[in-house]
Image (cartoon, rainbow, N blue to C red):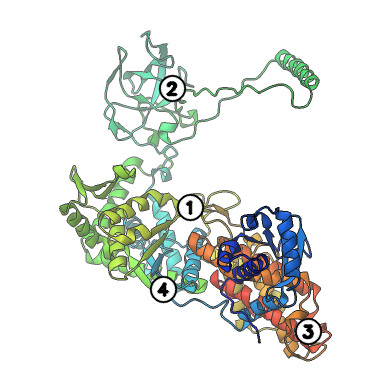
Amino acid sequence: MEGELKLSLKPLEDAKLLIANEVCTALGIDLKEAKGLAPKIQIANVHSRKSGSADVALRCFVLTRYQKGKKPQEIAQTLHEELKKKVGTSPVIQDITVSGPYLNIQLSMKFLGQVMTSVTKGDLLKALPQNKERVMIEYSQPNTHKAFHVGHMRNAALGDCLVRMFEFCGHPVVAANYFGDEGAHIAKCLWKTKRYVEEKKFDIDSIAEKDRAGWLGNMYSTAVSELALGNLTDLPFPNVIAAKVLEVKDHPAADAPKNWHVVTVQIGKDTKKTVVCGGRAYKVGDFVGYLPVGSRLKNKEIVEKDMKGILSCGVMLGYTEMGLSEPADPKPEKKAEEKVEEKVEETKVGKKKKKKGKGGGGKKSKKQKIKLPSKIYIVDPIYNPTPGVSLPELGKTAKDIEDVVAEIKKRNTEVGDLLRAMEEGDKEAVALWEKTKKWSLDEFKRIYAWLDCRFDHDFFESEVSESSRKLVIDLEKKGVLQKVQGAICANLEKFKLGFLILLKSNGAGLYATKDLQLAQIKFEQFKIDKSIYIVDASQSLHFKQVFKVLELMGYQQAKKCVHLPYGMVVLPSGKMSSRKGTVIVFTTLRKNLNDHLEKEYMAKYKGQWSPEEIENAKRQLAVGTIKYGMLNHDVAKDIVFEMSKWSAKTGTTGPYNMYAYTRTVGIKAKVDNGEAKCSLGKVDYSLLTSQLERDILVHICGFWAILDDCVARQNPSPMCSFVYNLSKLSNLWYENVNVLKSDTPDLLATRVEFAACVGKTIKTCLALLGITALERM
């Protein structure tokens, strides 16, 4: 088209610069000043402005430095008169009004029409050439031998989205996974597997391929339960015994704390001990939790201790010391006469406040909260406590096991033995590990394929286990790390990051050990400039420490290592818990979601669409539901998973945005099918006269600004808002403009092109979020 402007990827910035040039020309200001003036031109928010208001505005206060002695209102009036003359010939200004010191400008439809062309036929929505920093995005990182659940989906959705966004913005991206394929969780799963096989005479190869990963997940969760003392007793407190309180006296020392008492307890048939106790809420006759001398509490051995002249033997434990919540203090029942007196006092106070008027009464006095001593744990009488009997024995639920503590110790020893056998290369143990590991990996790959998540390289913990230990030993020899009591550490105290243990005194490595080796591989073998780790927020200190050690190792890329922490996925009822059985595993989620989408979306198309198209639509709707739901929140915040809300046809959901796209492509399909009032003519942007059409095009102009913001902050939620707002505007246009009844061929062609522009933008946004738009829904 003759006289077309060459637009950048941010058309609104182009418009601002063009307007700044025209302002400078009108006021006789050097054109070199236009670049500084352009950023001060404000873009209107199309979602909150009044109908017919300006697209951009200029506060003429910023021009007083160029127009000495003139007030902003005068400058605005002068500009209005000069620029009004250019309406019709200006490439960017269609209308201009003045309001006091403000100059309000409406962008020309010629300019916005070129934006439309840039979307449908040009480069506005094309990915940039990959010539920026090389980035590795490490995400998902599931543990093998465990079930993939809804919490894993947030990491997968976030990582996949960032891979797409960084790549679209011109970064060569390596999408990496890091599988936890060794460690105690593997040994626990295989321990239970071996027991099950032996007890049931079971052949694990008989399990159907589709059920193997789920079966392994059940083995792991069962193992966790069977290895916990709480599985065999209601009172899972090893070494704690029941002690009967025989006497409680005040401490005789004048300088002893007020809450100290001298307590005599019975811990056996004929055995009594004296304990100095600072706790509360116990009395003579109660049975309390007691740790005798020689036991350990918080890694310290309990010894006889002189406490202000009294030799204290053992510890009476509080609820908090046993990892329990304190029971609430009972509220004392007030006497009837006290209640009446209180009511009278309240009435008097109320009358006084009314007399003082609104807000009267002065400052409220703040009650100082007094911290009370901890409550002592009381053994529930239902367990018929006997002095000296261990709590696990009192609460024993597994009546066929003589010593539940010894049994749990035995089981955990077996797990440890199996772990060592795997580490030492025992053929049988390694064969079982490799077979079951493949089951997990096969399932993960099926899940990733269903989710349309891409991975270019898979890392495994087991691959860096040995080499990472050697790396740490070498770094200690070079003086980068220090040896402390046989362990190798990084002293990061001067960086306020404490001590990081990298090799235990027994030679065992830790997660940080492997992360150092992994980073070295990323930098040296994959030539990474920037490395992003998508790992939950609980690992924040870990990564700060690892990145600092990498810096001390001399890697410049360490300064471009980013830990992207994200919040938890919770249910409306609260946190998911394996113990309570509230974790939603992937297979259950997929089935429930498919059933829901079948009923709500697909049932009416049975017999009209092929079974293959229905299944594909269900899958894409399910993926769109999950991904949009996971991404439509600030990364750092916890999110509540609610399937019915996330899959709704209206509101901020994946299906809503997908349907908005489907509507736009449906217009062209109907026109091609001969359903329009007239035939297609030529596109004429001047025929787009409604405020809604203008708002939509102005909104589309902001695409790259939003995408750049998402990449800069590694947070896709602004793109979710952007596409939702566009879908909302698009649906409003669809409902108010009957394209098929357009009066002229040129108007029909222009509206079809407009719909294509909107649809392509929605489709591109959804693709960046990892969602595939459907041609029909």
Q: Name the residue carrying label 1.
A: 578
The label on residue 747 is 3
Assign the C terminus to one quadrant of the image.
Answer: bottom right
Residue mark closest to the camera, 1 vs 4: 4
Badge 1 element? loop
Residue 770 visible from this viewpoint: no
Q: Within 10 angstroms of label 2, few (less than 14), some, or many (20 or more) residues?
A: some
Q: Within 10 angstroms of label 4, few (less than 14), some, or many (20 or more) residues?
A: some
Seen at 59% across and 76% down, the residue is 7
Badge 4 element? loop
The label on residue 172 is 4
Image marks 4 and 3: residues in contact by CB distance under 8 Å: no
What amino acid does circle 4 point to? Pro
Residue mark closest to the camera, 1 vs 3: 3
Badge 2 element? loop
Mark positioned earlier in the residue sequence (3 or 2): 2
Seen at 65% across and 57% down, the residue is 67
What's the CA distance linking mark 4 and mark 3?
Answer: 43 Å
292 relative to 718, above or below: above
Residue mark closest to the camera, 4 vs 3: 3
What's the CA distance linking mark 1 and mark 3?
Answer: 60 Å
534 relative to 393, above or below: below
What amino acid does circle 3 point to? Leu
